[in-house]
Structure formats: structure tokens, C-alpha cells
Amino acid sequence: MKLFSPFLLMIFALSLTACSEVLPRQRGNLALPQMAFTPDALEFGLRQHTAFSKEAASGGYGGGGGGCGCN
């Protein structure tokens, strides 16, 4: 148990170092297109619509509709 406690303390200390404050002048770098989760918003929307239409369920991605893809 004595070995387990320092190990947890070390993991906790290392996890705190990953948290940092982003300054306003640095936020422009994070807003670059390369940093986006989905680089092409139009393609992402099309894939979401296709997946929603194939599911034939209402909810989840917005509106209701059937599986025909006509919504």
C-alpha cells in the first residue's frame, strides 16, 4: 500500500501539468481550419444526413423522418 500511494500522487501531479490557460492572443492558433474536428463541414453535414436517413428513427440528429431519405 505504501508503494501504491506515491504512485497515485505522481500520476495526479503529472495530470495537473496538462491543464494550462490559453491566452487571448493564442486562441487564433486554435481556431485554424487544421484544428477542426471536421475539416469539411459540408461533407460532415451530408454524412450526418445520410446516417440519419438510414437509421429511420426520429431524434438524435435533429428532425424526424423515415428511411426513404426524403426528409
Image (cartoon, grey):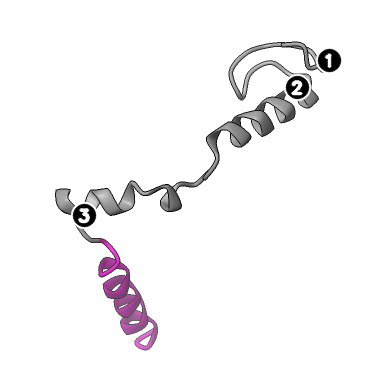
Amino acid on which the number 1 mark rests in the picture: Cys
Left or right: where does residue 10 sit relative to residue 67?
A: left
Task: Name the residue: 31% across, 83% down.
Answer: 6
Amino acid on which the number 3 mark rests in the picture: Gln
Task: Name the residue at the bottom extreme.
Answer: 3
What residue did someone put label 1 on?
68
Q: Which mark sits nearer the N-terminus, 2 or 1?
A: 2
**Percent coordinates x, y for residue 4 in the rendering:** 39, 82
Amino acid on which the number 2 mark rests in the picture: Ser
14 relative to 69, above or below: below
Left or right: where does residue 44 sit relative to residue 58?
A: left
**Percent coordinates x, y for residue 34 in the rendering:** 44, 53
Q: Is residue 5 magenta?
A: yes
> Which stretch appears magenta?
1-19
**Percent coordinates x, y for residue 3 in the rendering:** 37, 88
Q: How far apart, in angstroms, are the residues tagged by discs 3 and 2? A: 40 Å
